[in-house]
Image (tube, rainbow, N blue to C red):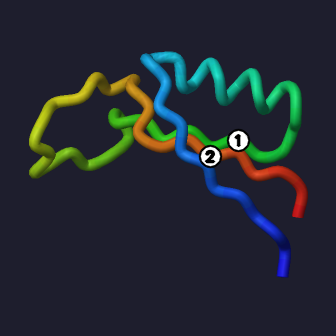
Amino acid sequence: MTPSLATYIALPGTTAEAMEHWHDVFGGDLHILRYGTMDLQGMPFEPDPQAVDHPSRRHGG
């Protein structure tokens, strides 16, 4: 089993920039899911299409 760590951080509109910086520093695979690429039907609010819904960075393994 490979050890893993899942951390959730809330950033004020700078999530993509922070994740790109950490990717530059640590490498690995970076994935950024933005609201504009999702089906928003039934969403209780209308988010900015460029806003980040879920980022992830996987290192190694």
Q: Residue furthest bottom?
A: 1
| Foreground pick, 16 / 10 | 10
Depth check, mark 2 against mark 1: the one in front is 2
Q: Amino acid at mark 1?
A: Leu
Query: Which residue shows up at 21% across the image and 45% down it?
Result: 40
The image shows residue 54 at horizontal and vertical percentages of 48, 43
Instruction: From this view, report whether residue 36 is shown above or below residue 17.
Output: below
For label 2, the residue is 56
Residue at point 39%, 23% (across, down): 50
Q: Residue at x 76, y 64 (%)?
A: 4
Q: Position of residue 56 (x, y in %)?
A: 62, 46
Check contact, mark 2 vs mark 1: CB within 8 A.
yes
Residue 48, horizontal then vertical, whole percent: 28, 23
* Front-most of residues 1 and 52: 1
The numbered mark at residue 30 is 1
Image quadrant holding the C terminus, namely: bottom right
Left or right, 33 with reference to 2: left
> Considering only order in the chain, which callout, 1 or 2, is on the residue closer to the N terminus?
1
